[in-house]
Image: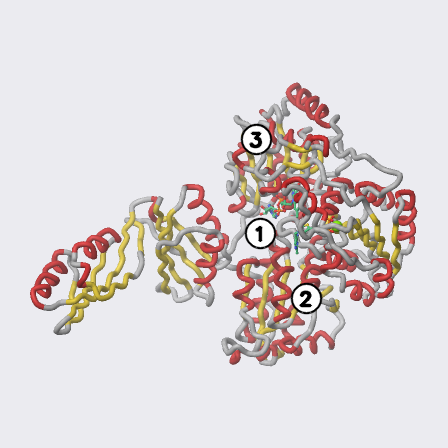
Amino acid sequence: MVLTGAEIVVRCLQEEKVEYVFGYPGGAVLFLYDELFKQDQVRHVLVRHEQAAVHAADGYARCTDRVGVALVTSGPGATNAVTGIATAYCDSIPLVIISGQVPTAAIGQDAFQEVDTVGITRPCVKHNYLVKDVRDIASTIRKAFYLAASGRPGPVLVDIPKDVCVQKCEFEYPREITMRSYNPVVKGHLGQIRKALQLLLEAERPMIYTGGGVILSDAAEKLTKLARLLGFPVTSTLMGLGGYPASDRQFVGMLGMHGTYEANMGMHYSDVLLAVGARFDDRVIGDPAHFGQEPRKIIHIDIDPSSISKRVKVDVPIVGNVADVLDELIRQVESGSARPKQEALDTWWKQIDEWRRRECLKYKNSDEIIKPQYVVEKLWEVTGGDAFVTSDVGQHQMWAAQYYKFEKPRRWLNSGGLGTMGVGLPYAMGAQLAHPGSPVACITGEASIQMCIQELSTCKQFRLPIKIVNLNNRYLGMVRQWQELFHGGRYSESYMDSLPDFAKLAEAYGHVGIRVDAPSDVEGALQEAFKRKNELVFLDFQVDQTENVYPMVQGGKGLTEMILSAEDL
Amino acid sequence: MRHVISLLIENESGALSRVSGLFSARGYNIESLTVAPTEDASLSRMTIVTTGSDDIIEQINKQLNKLVEVVKVVDISESAHIERELLLIKVRATGKDREEMKRMADIFRGRIIDATDTSYVIEMTGNQQKLDSFVAAIDRSLILETVRSGVVGVGRGERVLKV
Ligand SMILES: Cc1cc2nc3c(=O)[nH]c(=O)nc-3n(C[C@H](O)[C@H](O)[C@H](O)COP(=O)(O)OP(=O)(O)OC[C@H]3O[C@@H](n4cnc5c(N)ncnc54)[C@H](O)[C@@H]3O)c2cc1C
Ligand SMILES: Cc1ncc(C[n+]2csc(CCOP(=O)(O)OP(=O)(O)O)c2C)c(N)n1
Ligand SMILES: [Mg+2]
């Protein structure tokens, strides 16, 4: 069948069973929009800013096991998308971004709305393409989806010049894809897995350290099974939360800069560390020179060889997909007769329980002023711990991670690697579209929410009943906290004056806005919000301005040097 | 430590900038980088001379392999190999210098490939040290222009970099 380039693009999206394209039109993509108009299989979500288009596609991908898709025009459309692309790249989220480009003959002529999109995005995509021939569109889009979702996932950008959209050629969607230069290893090396198991069975103070790879690999059940078989403690990075049920006794909480005392101490004093899809980030282990004590053995499962031994030397590297490797580990444990050293484990658990008794997440609640932690705890109660929760970046993000106990994977959506303020609302849009009947809450701050506030309009158009939980401390709280602790309390530009009345602002967009000042009103307001099943409710909680996030490990320090509360300062 | 990394990459537009961008983005050194298509026109071969600790070289290898269009990477300096570089040098060649320059070129097995009344262009291949010593051996004030190709290399014996 002979089709135009634009028809082919839309046919490819249909072939990939794309439900939603998040985008924004413009000159270079007019032909593509014309084709979208003529069909109703792929639905288009019109955002109010291209950054939000990519974030929303990213949010959609995070809470499903699918590739998110965004469509933007050339020039400013593409540059607006860059923050979204980089955000997805840093957290390994599978996306396909289609961008319009000026006609091939105009490329390089400083044409209207021309930028070198492939050049600008090169360092923040898994791969990108400029399609100069209509005959390459189908195979390129097929490759883009394949690359985005396989191996270590990531965003792939396809830049399509306007004239290529009107050229014609025979269309056939390639079924099979083979690339001689790209063959990610999925199954782990059996010998390495055997070695790993031996170390695990000899361990006296083991720790399972899990990360975003568990979520990306949809391996939560397998992880849970293996951890229970072994009886080892489990900690998770910010990105891995929900990969192991937070209420389980074996879960010691998040680790790292704002991790729990027991997780960080356990990590440091472990003698065998099983890292599963986690990349020893600087916010997790601090300074590698202070990380852990010898002798200690590290096993690292990761699909990306470059994640292994990057910051910390690893003893048993296992390159492969988390789900496949865990399967094999489980198989070997179950088929063998050897079991972990129970006596040593009991002693280790006693030690961990002692650390737990520090109750590092305890905070002083108040009758007068709303504590942000309290709001998150109540949100968890009101939603039965079963909502899709997104956050922005700052203190509220850490409180969300610490106090909302995630039981299931793909329920927690936030920007860990790039730390992009503004993701919260678009992530919630992606989540709500992917899970129409489910509660979706966006925990945010008064500064972050303003970075994509225009999306309240999109939410109205698409009737997305998101619940926005604004922990309004009138400060760039995370910045203020660092200034308080490390810059002599000089609050340089971290106080934001002239904030809008968020409740009224929400109303102006056609939503419900509720301002909450008293702790006694918190629970009622949350209940009221979730009762309104079909409406977006903006809850503006006026919280304690001076609250800080604890525990805290300062940059450059080791995991055992935690500040547990203001009294430690 | 100095390493010579050879790689095969799909001969697509932008391939070179993916590699050079990787080195600059991650702060790796590039001493030289050469690239040209191979007998299979769909593949280019690059030779990169770099320096770094073992950990850095390991990361460089992994990061190069991670580039979607890179088909194969080998650190040819890990075992017996041959390196060659091409030097074209234009020198002043007048009076008694003319004879001396010819003599030096002969000693280093260079060839004069262009001559005017006042200048020579000398072509020379060899490893980096040999070319360095030639440039050091001739009178500096007589050098008009030098151009070097950067290193290319190949493993000795049965070791072959091929898809
Ligand atoms: C304000 C702020 C504070 C923060 N504080 C903390 C903190 O206290 N604690 C904390 O943990 N983080 C914190 N972070 C987040 C931190 O910056 C990192 O983003 C995070 O720790 C990285 O998580 P990860 O190691 O799980 O890696 P991810 O970025 O999730 O990477 C996943 C890893 O798994 C691998 N992988 C992917 N798919 C697969 C697969 N299928 N099979 C095998 N492997 C796979 C990838 O190659 C990669 O190595 C903070 C961020 C912000 C913005
Ligand atoms: C786009 C962007 N700009 C700047 C920062 C640096 N930054 C990190 S947290 C933060 C303050 C966030 O304030 P708010 O959203 O009110 O959250 P709070 O910390 O007060 O809970 C800033 C400015 C960032 N992460 N992202
Ligand atoms: Mg704030």
How are the colours assigned in the image? Answer: secondary structure
Q: Which mark is residue A292?
A: 3
Name the secondary structure under disc 3: loop
Could you tell me how far apart the alpha carbons at marks 1 and 3 are, in whole angstroms? 29 Å
Q: Is residue B30 left or right of residue A97?
A: left
Disc 1 within 8 angstroms of ligand 1 (CB): yes
Name which residue lies at 22% across and 55% down: B131
Q: In the rendering, which numbered label is found on residue A383?
A: none
The answer to whether residue A333 is visible is no
Query: Where does label 1 land, which residue?
Result: A151
Asked whether the residues under marks 1 and 2 belong to the same chain, the reply is: yes
Relative height, residue A154 to residue A134 (above, below): above
Residues at badges 1 and 2 in contact (C-beta under 8 Å)? no
Residue bearing mark 2: A50
- Gap between marks 2 and 3, in whole Å? 43 Å
Which quarter of the rendered picture does the C terminus of chain A lie within?
top right
Q: Chain of mark 1?
A: A
Q: Position of residue A52 (x, y in %)?
A: 70, 62
Give the residue displayed 78% in from the left and 33% down from the top.
A362
* Mark whose residue sits in front, 1 or 3: 3
- Please name whichever residue, B105 or A209, is drawn nearer the observer in this view of the structure: B105
Amino acid type for the residue under numbered disc 2: Glu
Q: Earlier in the sequence, mark 1 or mark 2?
A: 2
Mark 3 neighbour class, 10 Å CA radius: few under 14, some 14 to 19, many 20 or more: many
Foreground of the two, A568 or A250: A568
Q: Position of residue A167 (x, y in %)?
A: 58, 80
